Image (cartoon, helix red, strand yellow):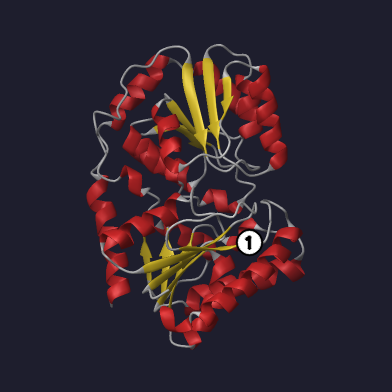
Amino acid sequence: MGTKVILLRSQDIFSDSRVLKYESLLKKENIPYAIVGWDRKGLNLKRENTFFYKRRAGFQEGEKAIVNRVWWTFFLFRFLFMHLKEYQIIHACDFDTVLPSLVMRILGKKVFFDIFDWFSDEVKTGKSWIDKPINLLEKFAVRHSDLVILCEKGRLRQIQCTPKNYIVIPNVPSQLLGQINSTKIVKENVSWPIVIAYVGGIVHSRGLLELVDCISGDDRFVLKIAGFGDSIIENTIKAAAQKYMNINFYGKVSYDRALEIMRESDILYAMYYKDNANHIYAAPNKFYESIYLNKPVITTEGTLVGNMVKQYRNGFVISEGKQALSDFLNSLTPQSIYMKKQDMGKTKDWEKKIQNCFSQYIKAIND
């Protein structure tokens, strides 16, 4: 393998914009790297510099997901140990990759713990004998990693422990860098029907079923949804798309295709229901996609992303639930979207901020 940095992520990598961003940056800096991902659907995936774990597994599977992740952990431990002499730094993405990484730290490797989501809140079972040990282990990982990477500083309030060394790298996909305020991207004209886009995880607590229910058959709107995840929600969306001409479901798409879908829209949907504690502190791609693509975003009151949208005036912040969404959609007009887009043109220079964050990451690798 012969590399300096090895990235670990329990996804297929192809559609993971944050991992792809790191890969792009490492290539740009000519830093040798490898990636370990998880081929959950048994598709015999292959990509450059990437190794895949082959065990089949779904998403949002509760206790079954914990069993699958135990096997994943054993695989990572074996892989990292077998290739011990072939890398220097482990970039562990989320808690389900960090424990075997910390074992390698005892053997002289540096560990970067990148918190995409706070795992303790993401997989809560309601059983203290499962949930409490996971939380303690996750905090242990924060305290004992060489570097912790956060999406936003506000995440510190959620994890309730302070890393000895951390940096913030916002969720700006590499495909967007250098494109802010690009005239190719900015679509000024908005007319009926209003095109709403959602690209992301098809999971509970995102208000997707409420959105589909509100939009179905309403000729004022066109809904474009892409993503994958919970099969029950996916099937409900597919059925609605077959029944109603104004709903389109694309399934899993590449990130480049995701950007095309969002560019073709008038407004982005990014609700994060607060029954999942991770959503309160979420710092999603969608905030930055909104800024870079000059597309207003619909998001949730009382969340970190909601506060950011209010601060930078790049969208609409509403309460969660079907009634609040229905009331908002009934008030939404092409003119209100157009006015919001004009306001968004006054946003700060994000490029400089993001490049400074990347510089900190490269410095940590080279130190």
Asked if 329 appears above or below 119 in the picture, the reply is above
The amino acid on which the numbered mark 1 sits, given as a three-letter code, is: Lys
The residue lying furthest to the bottom in this view is 107
Residue at numbered disc 1: 54
Asked if 122 appears above or below 274 in the picture, the reply is below
Asked if 187 appears above or below 22 in the picture, the reply is above
Question: In the image shown, does 335 or 242 lie closer to the viewer?
Answer: 242
Residue 247 in view (yes/no): yes
Q: Residues within 10 Å of mark 1 (few under 14, many from 20)?
A: some
Place of residue 318 in the rendered image (x, y in percent of width and height, measured from the top left): 52, 32
Place of residue 188 in the rendered image (x, y in percent of width and height, measured from the top left): 30, 20
Residue positioned 49% across, 87% down in the render: 106
Asked if 21 appears above or below 307 in the picture, the reply is below
Question: In the image shown, does 181 or 23 lie closer to the viewer?
Answer: 23
Quadrant housing the C terminus: bottom left
Q: Quadrant of residue 305?
A: top left
